Image: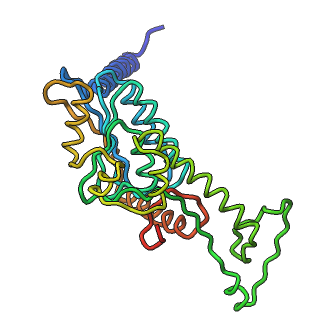
Amino acid sequence: MKRHPVILGFALLAVIGLFFFLILRLFVSFGEETRNFSFRDKIGVVPIEGVLSDSKDTIRQLDRYERDNGIKAVVLRIDSPGGAVVPSQEIYDKVLQVKKSKKVVVSMGSVAASGGYYIACAADRIIANPGTITGSIGVIVQFSQIEDLLRKVGLKTTVVKAGRYKDVGSPVREMTPPEKALIQGVIDDIHDQFIEAVVLNREISRKEIEQIADARIFTGRQALEAGLVDGLGNMDHAIDTAAELAGIEGKPEVVYPEKKRKGLLRYIARETISSISEELRGSGSGIDYLYKPGCGM
């Protein structure tokens, strides 16, 4: 039986097309792996920006730099007022892990307070700008109370629970003294964990830290006096410090994470969700390492 030449032609074209597609994919993959190839030693930069609500992206980037033998040091560029407790602690733990094999330096931007400082204190060196707002070694939790409002509009709520403290922080009733004591105990323990992290990584006694761990804020210059940072300078100074600590001769190559391209609608949606999330966190009951102007911190 003869094979139709047209069918053979289409089959041949399909094979050739598949071949070129595989070659193209190979070059793209190779390019991704070798994009940062250089004969010079490299310093990897990890930006930590905004309110901390998740640690995955930061940890993923730190892990990538940790496995890259060409990266000799890491600079964390922190511009954050802090945020949720657990993401702050997870990034802090990852920095300690990376520090076992590479030098880690923090460059503080406009704000590196509360959870931002929690992360920073894990580094080998902390460089702040003179006007950086930092410190705020404290913990905050807030509960909304709408009992009076419900009474005015004639609404009532019914709660069925198993466990005395199951509805602690309910917005529809006043918190009892035992409940306040319970929450205060949790807050005090989380605050103590913050103090322990600072004492462990900074050459300051616990007694000295406790005197300033009342959530007060410092400028970068004040923080240097208090021993909370190691020097004053900008991002370039932090990079130079990292190169010196890592023993890099000559000018290092600075590597930044690749920015993901996003469409306009996706960007607007992400920013809207982020803004709403921050507002909800501000009025909700999450426990945070967070510097919030006007909240007594």
Colour option used: rainbow
**Residue 175 visible here:** yes
Query: Most extreme residue toward the left, as rendered?
Result: 250
Picture coordinates of residue 77, whole percent (x, y): 31, 46
97 vs 89: above or below: above
Picture coordinates of residue 63, whole percent (x, y): 43, 31
Which quadrant holds residue 275? bottom left
Which quadrant holds residue 135? bottom left
Left or right: 146 with respect to 217?
right
- The image shows a total of numbered marks equal to 0
Q: Nearer the viewer, residue 86 or 137?
A: 137
Q: Nearer the viewer, residue 251 or 200?
A: 200
Picture coordinates of residue 273, whole percent (x, y): 47, 62
At 26% from the left and 32% from the top, the residue drawn is 43
**Residue 257 visible here:** no
At 22% from the left and 46% from the top, the residue drawn is 235
Q: Nearer the viewer, residue 288 or 124?
A: 124
At 37% from the left and 52% from the top, the residue drawn is 49
Picture coordinates of residue 285, whole percent (x, y): 61, 64
Q: Nearer the viewer, residue 37 or 9?
A: 37
180 vs 83: above or below: below
212 vs 106: above or below: below
